Amino acid sequence: MPKLDFSLQFETVKAQEGAYSVIIVAAGSSRRMGGEDKLMMSIFGVPVIARTLRAFDNSALIKDITVVTREEKIDDIWLIAKKYSIAKLKSVVAGGACREESVRNGVALYKGKAEKVLVHDGARPLVSNDVIKNVCDALKNNDSVTCGVRLKDTVKRVSDDGFAVETLNRDSLFAIQTPQGINVERFLRAAADTDLSVFTDDTSVMESVGIRTAIAEGDYRNIKITTKEDIAAAEAYLSEEL
């Protein structure tokens, strides 16, 4: 039986006209991994963050990449970019105390330089170019965009004492993913003088000041690596593609 090849393609795809910049957020603490850095964990021999970077380096819809990470990981990101020939990586900056502070640090680099940018979780290495395109297309006519997928499971709201209070109509419920797209100036204004620790995604910051978020089609395979079981799931998805 021939050996399966799960290595990355070392080819940077030239950006097309109108391509966007992307900020990759990689500053988390990996609490649910028991302290092990999930972004450096291997998926068929390749670090999670390398696969995430490669997904955007391989897209003609992306012109450059900024990574926001922990201060002590900045050199590691540059080394991985060199090893895996990530030519579109332009900046690596330190994150903040919470996710949205980290996003704000990255977005601030584009103030006065770009009208709109994408933001993506470093721990979503299986993002496809189709999903990137869906978000980019929606961002052309909107200032706040996210991708998402319809929920498959029944969802119940539960009381503090552990009893079901309400069964929600899942037809209108989406599991939200990244990339998300935001207007730089409007995001920075919304994020100013605000407790960013209460937000769980970038478009929520926009929604807090009345900006509507458009929903683009995501992908059930666009999983976020959070636990070790997710590594196995990612490898299973990659195996299906060969």
Image (cartoon, helix red, strand yellow):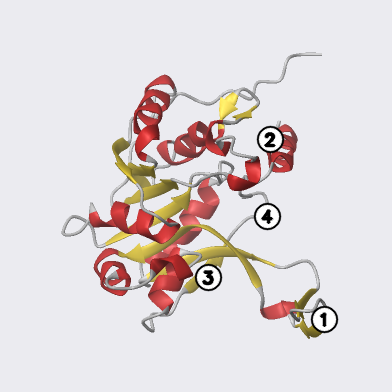
The residue positioned 64% from the left and 49% from the top of the image is 223
Q: Is residue 136 visible?
A: no
**Sequence-wise, which precedes: disc 1 or disc 2?**
1
The amino acid type, in three-letter code, at marker 4 is Tyr
Res 220 label: 4
Residue 187 horizontal/vertical position (percent): 31, 68
Distance in Å between CA atoms under marks 1 and 3: 28 Å
Outermost residue toward the front? 161
**Sequence-wise, which precedes: disc 1 or disc 3?**
1
Q: Is residue 148 visible?
A: yes
Residue labelled with disc 1: 164
Tag 4 secondary structure: loop
Neighbours of disc 4 within 10 Å: few (<14), some (14-19), many (20+): some
Q: Nearer the viewer, residue 101 or 66?
A: 101
Tag 3 secondary structure: strand
The amino acid type, in three-letter code, at marker 2 is Leu
**Sequence-wise, which precedes: disc 4 or disc 2?**
4
Distance in Å between CA atoms under marks 1 and 2: 37 Å
Dots 1 and 3: beta carbons under 8 Å? no
Q: Nearer the viewer, residue 241 or 89?
A: 89
Distance in Å between CA atoms under marks 4 and 2: 13 Å
The amino acid type, in three-letter code, at marker 1 is Ala
The amino acid type, in three-letter code, at marker 3 is Ile
Distance in Å between CA atoms under marks 1 and 4: 27 Å
Res 238 label: 2
Question: Which label sits in the foreground, 1 or 3?
Answer: 1
Dots 1 and 4: beta carbons under 8 Å? no
- Relative to 64, 207 lies left or right: right
